[in-house]
């Protein structure tokens, strides 16, 4: 160390700075490497699965019966791994969920951001957040024990056959779960639309609802669409509700009154209980996981990109 | 087509006669008496009495926070939108009480257009921005009529030549000065009698400002214009009448020439000569 007047007061200062920097860097590195590891193992195991089952059959096959024989001489020795019924089931339940949550979420956001007084808003917003804080397992048994039987009952009374584990029941409850997500993103987006636009419209003599319909919502629409993509991603990846309320049978149907199963449910089914870790049945879970990961990642990236871009536009 | 529920302006002067001289009508277009405004109990303006002449530009000047914008926003009741804002006193437009119980603010704001401090075009096309007002007021039955209104408004706002080939382009792509002229066109499209302007040039460069000022000068032959401005030079350039506000009070109002050369109040003199502000 030199002893000029500009040299550090504490020779250790530089060392401490470097140490802190290294510790912080390692922490973020651990998180990133774990993520990379998980994705890598997902891809690796999925590749092993695709050695025994063709990727074409997996993506486009319409029959899913993953039961493989325990002994080689048993009947039905090899399962069928066409995942289309699972994709359709997932899409069906997510669609039902979206039909519930999109209108309710967006309309409540409009009410909260445009009409509600500050006092009301300060009570209602936390209440909505509570809805987001309910564990999904609670939603799950609510769906299985309350909604599903009620729908089935109601169906039989009006002469409709509603499966006990219908896509409708799971979708409805999932929709309720997603309301806070859509509502809070939409609320943010609508609040980000500058007041100068509202004033411009009101100054021309437009009423409040005209202003909302013709100026605020069109301006907010791209952002809200981004929010809905995030909600879809959430619905697609949701597990607990569908494990409890959706079926296990891989029916290929577009009727929400039937029982369907989802990608997440099948992953749970494939991996619970005693497993052989190299059977196609077990490896199929990784292939499903990879498919799910790809879809939710793409939705998340696009969704958050849109939302971000929207916020920047009015900064 | 135009269904004005309030009475027609009392003026009989045609625009050509009007432009030949600085004739100012004797009957005030807008009359404010004892107007007081408070925001959640804080008084913003006190006992303002002001007559605004028809077909002339009246400038409201004064230091920041003097209440000039607050007063402007009372005229078309934009202050209604602010929570906790209370207006007392009386404002009339052509002798009709603006705050009367049966007044429809939609009709009122159609008669009194407004241009804001920051250009605020809607995130729609240029055409849709101008067509917005006529659409909500049901002014045009057919597409051709609407086209005509849009063209006429853009011509009057001096923007037509610059945008006629790209009416479907997004309005947010225009320059700041063009956006502000678009906002003026948007206000004109509903055929108001009065246009309120709240520091319309404060976000613009000098060239764009000069264009807007020229435009204001053209528009006064047809409209009663009330403009709030920070710039005394601007007030001197565009207005025929000038009102000086200070600390929530209207200090004095007179012909612009008088205010800037021979004001009667000491505070006005101090402000226009630059020793307070």
Image (cartoon, rainbow, N blue to C red):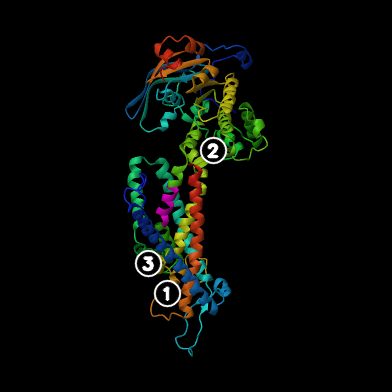
> How many neighbours does mark 2 have within 10 angstroms: few (below 14), some (14-19), or many (20 or more)?
many
Q: Secondary structure under badge 2?
A: loop
The N terminus of chain B, quarter of image: top right
Cα separation between marks 2 and 1: 52 Å
- Name, please, the residue furthest toward the bottom: A73
Q: Are marks 2 and 1 on the same chain?
A: no
Q: Measuring from the top left, give residue A131's x and y in whole percent.
A: 35, 55
* A221 vs A20, nearest the viewer: A20
Disc 3 vs disc 1: which is toward the camera? 1
Q: Measuring from the top left, give residue A246's x and y in whole percent.
A: 43, 68
Residue A114 in sight? yes
Residue A179 shown in magenta: yes
Residue shown at the point (60%, 21%) measured from the top left: B218
- Name, please, the residue furthest toward the front: A3
In the image, the segment drawn in magenta is A178-187
Disc 2 vs disc 3: which is toward the camera? 2
Residue A159 in sight? no
Residue shown at the point (40%, 18%) measured from the top left: B276
**Considering only vertical position in the picture, is A122 above or below A176?**
above
Q: Measuring from the top left, give residue B114's x and y in whole percent.
A: 51, 28
Res B56 label:
none
Res B122 label:
2
Which residue position is annotated with label 1? A269
Cα separation between marks 3 and 1: 17 Å
Q: Image quadrant of residue B210?
A: top right
**Considering only vertical position in the picture, is A187 above or below A250?**
above
Which residue position is annotated with label 3? A144
- Chain of the residue on which disc 1 is drawn: A
């Amino acid at each position: 160390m030199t002893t000029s007047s500009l040299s550090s007061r504490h020779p250790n200062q530089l060392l401490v700075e470097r140490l802190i920097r290294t510790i912080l860097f390692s922490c973020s590195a651990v998180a990133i490497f774990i993520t990379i590891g998980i994705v890598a193992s997902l891809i690796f195991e999925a590749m092993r699965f695709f050695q025994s089952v063709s990727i074409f059959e997996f993506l486009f096959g319409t029959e899913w019966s993953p039961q493989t024989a325990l002994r080689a001489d048993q009947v039905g020795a090899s399962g069928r791994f066409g995942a289309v019924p699972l994709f359709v089931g997932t899409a069906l339940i997510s669609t039902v969920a979206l039909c519930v949550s999109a209108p309710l979420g967006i309309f409540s956001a409009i009410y909260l951001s445009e009409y509600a007084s500050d006092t009301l808003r300060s009570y209602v917003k936390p209440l909505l957040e509570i809805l987001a804080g309910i564990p999904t397992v609670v939603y799950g048994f609510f769906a299985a024990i309350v909604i599903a039987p009620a729908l089935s009952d109601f169906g039989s009374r009006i002469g409709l056959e509603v499966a006990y584990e219908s896509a409708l029941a799971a979708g409805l409850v999932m929709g309720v779960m997603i309301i806070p997500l859509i509502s809070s993103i939409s609320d943010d987006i609508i609040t980000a639309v500058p007041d100068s636009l509202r004033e411009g419209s009101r100054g021309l003599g437009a009423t409040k609802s005209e202003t909302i319909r013709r100026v605020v919502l069109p301006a907010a629409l791209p952002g809200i669409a981004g929010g809905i993509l995030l909600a879809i991603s959430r619905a697609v990846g949701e597990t607990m509700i569908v494990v409890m309320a959706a079926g296990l049978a891989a029916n290929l149907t577009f009727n929400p009154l039937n029982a369907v199963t989802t990608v997440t449910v099948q992953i749970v089914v494939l991996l619970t209980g005693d497993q052989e870790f190299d059977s196609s049945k077990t490896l199929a879970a990784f292939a499903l996981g990879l498919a799910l990961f790809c879809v939710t990642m793409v939705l998340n990236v696009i969704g958050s990109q849109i939302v971000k871009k929207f916020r920047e536009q009015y900064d | 087509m135009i269904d004005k529920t309030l009475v027609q302006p009392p003026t009989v002067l045609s625009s050509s006669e009007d432009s030949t001289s600085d004739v100012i009508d004797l009957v005030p277009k807008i009359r404010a008496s004892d107007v007081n405004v408070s925001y959640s109990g804080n008084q913003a303006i006190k006992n303002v009495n002001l007559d605004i002449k028809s077909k002339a530009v009246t400038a409201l000047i004064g230091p920041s926070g003097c209440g000039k914008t607050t007063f402007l926003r009372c005229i078309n009741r934009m202050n209604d939108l602010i929570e906790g804002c209370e207006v007392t006193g009386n404002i009339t437009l052509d002798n009709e009480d603006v705050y009367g119980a049966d007044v429809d603010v939609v009709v009122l704001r159609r008669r009194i257009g407004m241009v804001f401090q920051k250009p605020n075009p809607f995130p729609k096309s240029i055409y849709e921005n101008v067509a917005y007002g006529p659409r909500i007021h049901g002014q045009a039955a057919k597409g051709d009529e609407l086209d005509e209104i849009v063209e006429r408004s853009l011509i009057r706002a001096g923007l037509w030549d610059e945008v006629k080939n790209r009416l479907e382009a997004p309005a947010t792509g225009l320059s700041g000065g063009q956006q502000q002229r678009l906002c003026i066109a948007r206000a004109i499209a509903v055929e108001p009698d009065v246009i309120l302007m709240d520091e319309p040039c404060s976000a613009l460069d000098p060239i764009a400002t000069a264009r807007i000022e020229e435009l204001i000068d053209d528009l006064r032959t047809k409209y009663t214009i009330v403009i709030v401005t920070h710039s005394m030079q601007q007030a001197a350039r565009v207005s025929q009448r000038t009102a000086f506000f200070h600390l929530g009070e209207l200090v004095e109002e007179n012909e612009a020439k008088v205010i800037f050369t021979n004001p009667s109040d000491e505070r006005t003199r101090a402000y226009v000569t630059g020793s307070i502000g």
